[in-house]
Structures are given as C-alpha cells and as structure tokens.
Image: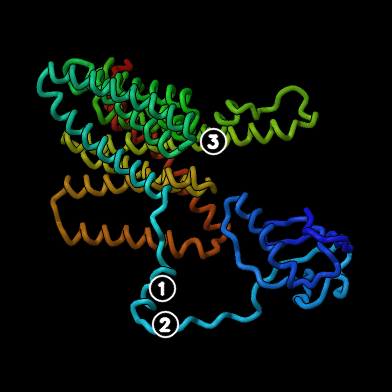
Amino acid sequence: MEVPATGAELRRVSVCADAVSVDLALPAAVPVASLMPAIVDILATEYRHRGESVPAWHRLSLPGDAPLDMSKTLAQLGIRDGSILVFTGPSTELTAPRFDDVAEAVSMSLAERARPWTRRTARLAGAITASWLAGAGALVLIRAAFDTADARRVSAGVAAAIGCIALLASGVAYRGFRDVIAGLTLGLLASGFASLAGLLAVPGGPGAPNALLAAMAGAAMSALVMGVTGCGTTVFIALSCLAMVAAAAALVGALTAGSPQAIAAASAAISLALLELSARVSILFAGLSPEGDADEPADPHRLKAKALRADSLLSSLVAAFAAAAALGAIGTAVAAHCAGGTRLLGIAFATVVGGVLLLRARAHGDQARSVPLVVSGTATLSVTFVVAAIAGPLQPPWVAGVAATLATAALCLGFIAPALTFSPVLRRGVDLLEYLALAAIVPLVCWICGLYGAARGLSLS
C-alpha cells in the first residue's frame, strides 16, 4: 500500500499499532507530521475491518526507541527500507477537563462508567424471559391437564405443536440468520415442550409411564434439534444423555415393583459410575483410540478435530451424568422422607453423593466440566439440608448454625483455598476421602434397595 507521492523517493516500512500491522511505501522527503493523517486513516480502516474500536495514536517511533521528531523527514531520520515503525501513546497524562456546569460534570462522570444496552444483552434478556415464561406456562398446563382426560389430550396436542414450531424456528434462526442465542433457546423450548407432550400423552398418572414417554420424547427432540440446527451440540448431547438415564429409571419403575427411593438410588450410583467412564467413552467415540501402527505420525488437522470433538463430548457426558446423579440423590432423599420409615438413610446417601460430585470437580480444569459438577453437588447438598431440617424436629438454632457453617465453608473454598498451596500429603488425603465416599455408595444403595434384608431372609440350608 502506497501513500501518494509525486516522483519522490519512497521508503518501504511496516507500521504496527497494537495487533494491526500494515506495509506502506512512504515518501522519504516529506515530514513525518504531514504523513501522519494518511497513516492513521489506513490503520483505522484495518481496525474497522476487524470490527474493533480504533485506538488513539500520537507518535511514531522505532521499536524500543524514543518517538521520532515529527518535523523531520524519513530520510533525515535515517529510516531505511524494511524498517518497523510503532505507534505510541502520549508521554504525559492529559489533564482532567474542567466544567463550568456541575450537571455536565456529573453527566460526563457517569458516562465513563455506563454500560449501554447492546443487541447481545437484548437477545440474552429475551431468551431468558422466553424460557422463564415457557416454564411457568408448562407448570400451569401440567396442573390443569391432569384434572380431566379431555384437557390432557388437548394439552398434549398443543405442546407437541409448539415443540414442532419451535424446532422449525430454531433451524431458521441459526441456518438463516446465524443467531446462536435464538437457535439454542428455541431448541431448548422444542425439547421442553416435546417432553411435556410425552408427559401428558399417557392416560392416567402422573407415574412412571408418563415419565418414560416424556424422557424419550425429550431425547428424540434434542437429537432432532442437533440435526436441524447444528448449534449447541454440547448442550443437546447432555440433554439427550440425561433424558436416556431418566428413561431407563422410569422403565425400571414401570416394569418392576421397586420403591421410588430404591430406583432413584440405583440410578444415582449408575450415573456416578458412568461419570467415571466419561473420559474413556469420549475418547472412543471421537476416534482418538490408537489404530493401526502407533509409530506412524498422525495428521495434525485430523488430530486437532478429534481432540476438540472428544473435549466437547466429555463436557456433555460430565454435565449429563452429574445432573443425573444429583437428581437421583435428591429423589432418594425426598422419596425416603415421603415414605416415612428410615429417613436418615436417604439423607446420608444424598449427602455422600453431593460430596462426591463436589470432590470430582477438582479433577477437571475446564469450566465446562467443573461448573456442572459444582452446581450439581451444591444443589444436592442444599436439597438434602432442607429435607433433613424438615424430617427432624425443627430446632432453629441448629438449622441456623449448620446453614452458617455451610456458607462459611463455601466462602473459604471460593476465596481462600485458590490462593493457598497445599502439600502433596494433603492432596492425597482429599483423594483418599473421595475414594472412601465412592466406596460407601454401593453399600448404601444395597441398604436402600433392601438387599441386606432379602439376603437375611434367604434359607441356605
């Protein structure tokens, strides 16, 4: 790119400003101050092409040197072909402006800190509001639909129609307008209304058959959304896996006479086992397992694509199985409380599962996997604490003390623990605690399912 010059000798230089660099041919006999406006315009054009804001530039300098004398030419400054020039900011800080009007000063001060409403903010607000209103409407629809059979059939048809419309709209939003937020939101609404239609389509209930059809409809719609839109694959794979676990638990409940707490406890234990196998499953499905001669060099582009696919699949599996384990543990505690009898067993099981989920978050450095584990573990312990407070004799001092202790522990783990360096012995101690918690899950599940009582009643003679 050349700055116009009439027969003058040119200097071919590279001008750098932050992340933007342009190659220019500048006249050697023109003062630098006269060249500045044209150079700034060229750099500003490059910044606009990148979609970035144009910074303020003031001086030209050689790398690591003082600013150039703006009154001299490139020839006088000894700038040769191939030189690199860098834009630098002002050497002194500008004085604060003085205002005669106090209102204007206040307005300018607030304008510096203001965060204006953007299109992305508007889309996020619209997506959250739409999801919230759709969820509220679904709850009202469920409450009203189970009153009469006719209302249930009509509601199931309406929910199915809304799910199909949301599916088509999500495809148009992403394929046509490349709007990821709209496509993801509409896809989630499609999966939710498909599950609602499955829940209401089965006569009677609500029961295990309703939950089975709802879970299968949600899994099928999530797969359709991935095929139609192609966006949010991590989210919809997680939803599909979670729905499949829920469908398996509902199928067991529909075919057997098992108690709800036993089925919930077994599903939580199986989900934790699948959580441990998530890494191997993601490697297998992404094609990262060694094939053929391991000594042959792999294609770097294919290897990178497989690694990214495995990472995305691992995030989906971790989120799905963590949520399934949390729901199973919560269901165990709630079902044990509603059934009466030994409530302490369900509370203990849910506490152990919540602790395991929180401890497993240490093994994942990526937020896409650690955050679902922390959220699932926290939700499990929170609901367990509420169930324990309701199940026993209500003593406000003890409840307040336990709540304050849990809040203090969370603050310490969030603010103090990351700044500390723990010894290898302490880390191994935490690992041992996690292994002990995992080992305690199987005996607790067998106890909740009544296997010990059944074994005691067997006649071995």
* Above or below, 16 relative to 281: below
Residue located 69% across and 33% down the image: 303
Front disc: 2 or 3: 2
- Identify residue for label 3: 312
Q: Circle 2 — which element?
A: loop
Q: Nearer the viewer, residue 231 or 80?
A: 80
Residue located 30% across and 19% down the image: 213
Numbered mark located on residue 99 in the image: 2
Discs 2, 1 touching: Cβ within 8 Å? yes
Residue 456 visible? The answer is no
Quarter placement of the C terminus: top left
Can you name the residue that lies furthest to the left here? 148
Marks 2/1: CA distance? 10 Å
- Identify residue for label 1: 108
* Left or right: 404, with 324 as reference point: left
Amino acid type of disc 2? Phe
Mark 3 crowd level (few <14, some 14–19, many ≥20, 10 Å Cα): some
Numbered mark located on residue 227 in the image: none
Query: Dividing the picture into quarters, in which one does residue 320 lie?
Result: top left
Q: Which of 21 and 455 is in front in this view?
A: 21
Q: Earlier in the sequence, mark 1 or mark 3?
A: 1
Residue 318: % across, % down: 47, 37
